[in-house]
Image (spheres, rainbow, N blue to C red):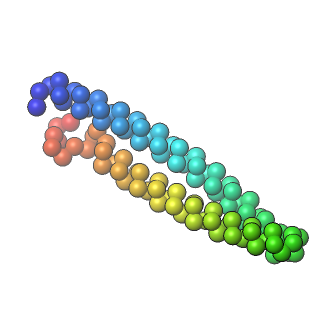
Amino acid sequence: MSKEVMKELIKTNISLEKKNIELLNSVNQLTKKVDNLVEIFTKAASHIEKGDVKEPLAAKLSELLDQNKKIARGLILLERYVKEKASFSSPLYNEENPEI
């Protein structure tokens, strides 16, 4: 490979790595926000169990809590996937050119 192609590959890898980091940060922020929502719904569910809220609203809140838990699990899986992909596309890891 020529030096120019090699430099371009390195530049592209670094750019990709920066985007992966941005994506990870966004996923982390989103995960924190979903965690906050789950906490809010958990508190609401405890109020429902105490009988502080009428029954139809309680059923809706319980359903929303379950949905938010599923979303949180999905986000955690997405975060793991992105981290795994980011580790393989790191400019420090290159099977073809171990000298990089």
- The quadrant of the image that shows the N terminus is top left
96 above or below 1? below
16 above or below 75? above
**Residue 50 x %, y %:** 85, 75
Tell me, yes or no, if residue 46 can be seen here.
no
- The quadrant of the image that shows the C terminus is top left
Specify whether 99 is left or right of 69: left
Residue found at the far left of this picture: 1
The image quarter in which residue 63 lies? bottom right
26 above or below 44? above
- Residue that appears at 30% across and 44% down: 89
51 above or below 12? below
- Residue that appears at 22% across and 43% down: 94
- Residue that appears at 67% across and 61% down: 38
Residue found at the far front of this picture: 56
- Residue that appears at 54% across and 48% down: 28
- Total residue callouts: 0
Tell me, yes or no, if residue 15 can be seen here.
yes
**Residue 92 x %, y %:** 27, 40
Specify whether 59 is left or right of 80: right
The image quarter in which residue 72 lies? bottom right
Specify whether 40 is left or right of 30: right
**Residue 13 x %, y %:** 30, 36
Residue found at the far top of this picture: 4
Q: Nearer the viewer, residue 1 or 56?
A: 56
Q: Which of 70 and 29 is in front in this view?
A: 70
